[in-house]
Amino acid sequence: MFIPVVLGTAREGRQSEKAAKFVYQEVKRFGVETDLVDVRNYLLLATDNTERSVMAKKWSEIMSRSDGLIIISPEYNHGYPGELKQMIDLIYPEYARKPLGICGVSSGLLGGGRMIEQLRLVSIELRMVPIREAIYFPQVADLFDEQGKIKDYGYYSKRIKTFLEELVWYARALKEARERRILNRRPL
Amino acid sequence: MFIPVVLGTAREGRQSEKAAKFVYQEVKRFGVETDLVDVRNYLLLATDNTERSVMAKKWSEIMSRSDGLIIISPEYNHGYPGELKQMIDLIYPEYARKPLGICGVSSGLLGGGRMIEQLRLVSIELRMVPIREAIYFPQVADLFDEQGKIKDYGYYSKRIKTFLEELVWYARALKEARERRILNRRPL
Amino acid sequence: MFIPVVLGTAREGRQSEKAAKFVYQEVKRFGVETDLVDVRNYLLLATDNTERSVMAKKWSEIMSRSDGLIIISPEYNHGYPGELKQMIDLIYPEYARKPLGICGVSSGLLGGGRMIEQLRLVSIELRMVPIREAIYFPQVADLFDEQGKIKDYGYYSKRIKTFLEELVWYARALKEARERRILNRRPL
Amino acid sequence: MFIPVVLGTAREGRQSEKAAKFVYQEVKRFGVETDLVDVRNYLLLATDNTERSVMAKKWSEIMSRSDGLIIISPEYNHGYPGELKQMIDLIYPEYARKPLGICGVSSGLLGGGRMIEQLRLVSIELRMVPIREAIYFPQVADLFDEQGKIKDYGYYSKRIKTFLEELVWYARALKEARERRILNRRPL
C-alpha cells in the first residue's frame, strides 16, 4: 500500500509546509508507505512540451505505483493553487480508480473547504474516488508552535486516523478490484 | 446487483420522463435489476417529521438493498430540482460506499452539466462514489419522437453502455469490499 | 431600499430560525426596509401548476419591489435545502440585476460555506449579483443563549455591518442603473 | 471603457488562441477599447517573490485602468488551467467591483461549462461581478476554418453581442458607482 502526499503550493513562505509534514508523518505512523511530493519540483513554463514530458514522466512514475493520493493545499481565492493544477493536469490514466483524500489549509476560518470542493470535481474527471473525509487546517498561523509542532495533536491525530481509515478502505477495495480485472483479462 | 433509477423532477409536463424511461429500459437490457423511482412519490411538506419518517422509511427500503444509484434529472438554474434534494436528504447511511451515476437533461445546449457537478458534491458528503461517466440529454424537446422513442439510439445506447460498465465495475468492487468488511466483523 | 430576508429551511426544530431572526433585526437596525420571508409559506407539491402559480405570484410580489435579497439557510449534505430551491425556482425575471447576500448555518465547523458556493452559482443564472461577503454561523447549537440571543454579539454585529454595507453598495448602484435604463427607454 | 481579453492557456498548440482572437476582434468591433493579454507573458516559477512582484506589477497596471474583464480559457479536467489561476492570484484589489465575462473552450460537447462555474466562484472572492452570459466553444477543432475564421459567424456574433451588452451594462453601472463613491470621499 503506497499513498504519496502532495504539497500543493510553491509560494515563498508557504504555511502549508508545516501541515504537509505533519500529515506525512501521520501517514507513516499509520503504517502506510508514503512519500512527500513537493509541487516545487514540478513547476513548468507550460508552453514547452519537452519540459512537460520530463515533468509528466517523473510524476507518472510515482502515481503509477500508488494506490491512492493525499493532496494538502492552501485555498487561494476559493480555488486551488495554479501550480498544483498544472501538476495534476500533467498525466491522466495513472489516476484511475484510486481514492483521493484532500487536506485544506487557510489563514481564515474555513480551512480550505471551497478549494476542496473544486478539487473533488477535478478528481472525478480524473476517474479518481474523492473520499468524504477531509482535514481542515483553518487559521494556520496559530496551529503550529515555533518548532513546527501541531499544538492540538489530540484533535488532529484523531481526525487523520478516521481520514486514513476511509482512504485505505477505498485503496484496498479498488486495488483488489483492479487486480481481479487484470486477472480476467478485461480492459481497465 | 440492484441499481434503481430515480427520476428527479416532479413538475407538470416534465420532459425528463422520456429520458428516464429510456435509461430505465437500457439498464434492464444491460442485465441489471432495477426499478424506476419517481420523486413525485416522495414530495413532502417538510415541516412535519411524521410525514418525513414515512417517506424516509419507503426510500430507505429501496436504497438499503441497492448496490448503486442512477439519478436522472433536469437542471434548473444550474442546480438540482428542490424536490430531488428533499428526497435525497431524507436518509443517510443507506448511501454509503455505493456508486452514483448521473444523467442530465436540459432544454439548452449543456445537458445538465452544471447540475451534475453540484449533485456530485452532495453525493460525496453522502459517502457515495460519483463516477466520471455521465449522460447528457441537451435540447431534450428534440431528442425523442412522438412515441417517446429516442431518435439517435445508436449514440445514446453506446454512451449508456460505457456509463453502466463503469457503474457496475464500482458497484461490484464496493459490494465485495463491504461484504468482506462484514465478514471481518469490522465497523463499516 | 427594500431587502427581504429569506429563511431557507422548513424543517421541524430548525436551528436557523434564531439566526434568521437575528439577521432580520440587524437589517432593520441598519436602516434598510426588510421583511422576514419564511420558506414554510412556499412549500408545494410540485406537480401542480395551479398551486405553483399561486406561490409564484406571492413571491413575485415581494421580489418585484425588492432591491436585493438576503438568504439565510442551513447546509444539508454540502448543498441547499430542497424547499429553498423549489421556492427560488418559482420565478425568474424578478431577480435580475439585484445583489444577493447569503448567510450559512451549520452544526459543524464550516458554517455552510459549501452551500453558499452552490447557491451563488444558482444566483448567477438568475442574473443576480452574489456579493463576496457572507456570514457563517457554524456550530449553531452553541451560538445562541436560551432566550435566542446571540452570545458573541460584538463579532457578529460587526460582520453583518460589513456584509450590509457591501450589499447596499450594490443595491444602490444597480437600482440607479436600472432606473437610468428605464428613463432611456432601453430594454432591461 | 476599457475591457481586456485574457487568453488563459499557455500550452503548445492551444486551440483557444483562435477563439480568443475572434472574441478580441468582436470586442473591438463592438466599440469597446480592449487588449489581448496572453497568459504566456505571466508564467512564473512561483517560489520567487521577486519574480511574482514583477509579473504582478505588469498585470496590475492593466487591471487598474480596466472597467471589466473577459477571460477565454479551455477546460482542463473540469477546472481552469493552472497558469491562468497563477496569473489571477497575482493581484487582488484591482479586480474589485468590475464585471467578468467568461468564454469556455473544449474539445468535447460542453464548451467549458464546468470550468466557467469554478472560475465564477473564484471571481466572487475577488469582489468581481460574474455575469450570467457566457460563450461556449465546444468541439473547438471543428469551429474554425484553415484561415482561423469562425465557421458559424452568424450564431457566434449574435451571442457575443448579447454577452457584451450585459458586460458593458455592468461595467458602466459599476464605474459610475465607484466614481460617485470617490466623490463622496467614502472608502471603496
Image: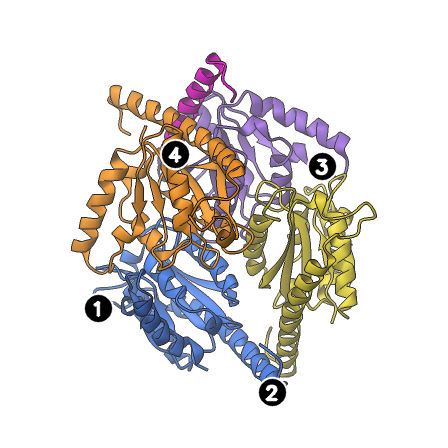
Chain colours: A yellow, B blue, C orange, D purple
Compared with D171, A111 (above or below) is below
**Callouts 2 and 3 close, C-beta under 8 Å:** no
Amino acid at dot 4: Val
- Indicate whether residue D180 is drawn in magenta: yes
Pointer 3 and pointer 4 on the same chain: no
Is B32 left or right of C136, judged from the image as shown?
A: left
Q: Report which residue position mark 1 lands on.
A: B147
Label 1 vs label 3, nearer the camera: 3
> Three-letter amino acid code at disc 1?
Gln
For label 3, the residue is D44
Which of the numbered marks, if any, corresponds to residue B183?
2
Location of residue D172 with respect to C97 vertically, above or below: above
Q: Is label 1 in a helix, a strand or a loop?
A: loop
Callout 3: 10 Å neighbours few (<14), some, many (20+)?
many
Do we see residue A48 in this rendering? no
Which class describes the residues within 10 Å of circle 2: few (<14), some (14-19), or many (20+)? few
- Residue at image location 27% in from the left, 66% down from the top: B40
Of helix, strand and loop, which one carries label 4?
Answer: helix
Q: Do the residues labelled 1 and 3 touch (CB within 8 Å)?
A: no
Q: Residue furthest front?
A: C147
**Magenta range:** D162-188
Amino acid type, residue under disc 3 in the picture: Leu
Asked if labels 2 and 3 share a chain, the reply is no
Q: What residue type is labelled 2?
A: Leu
Gap in angstroms between the C-alphas marked 1 and 4: 55 Å
* Residue C180 in the image, given as x and y percentages of width and height: 30, 20
Give the label on residue C27, or none. 4
> Is residue D157 depicted above or below A31 in this figure?
above
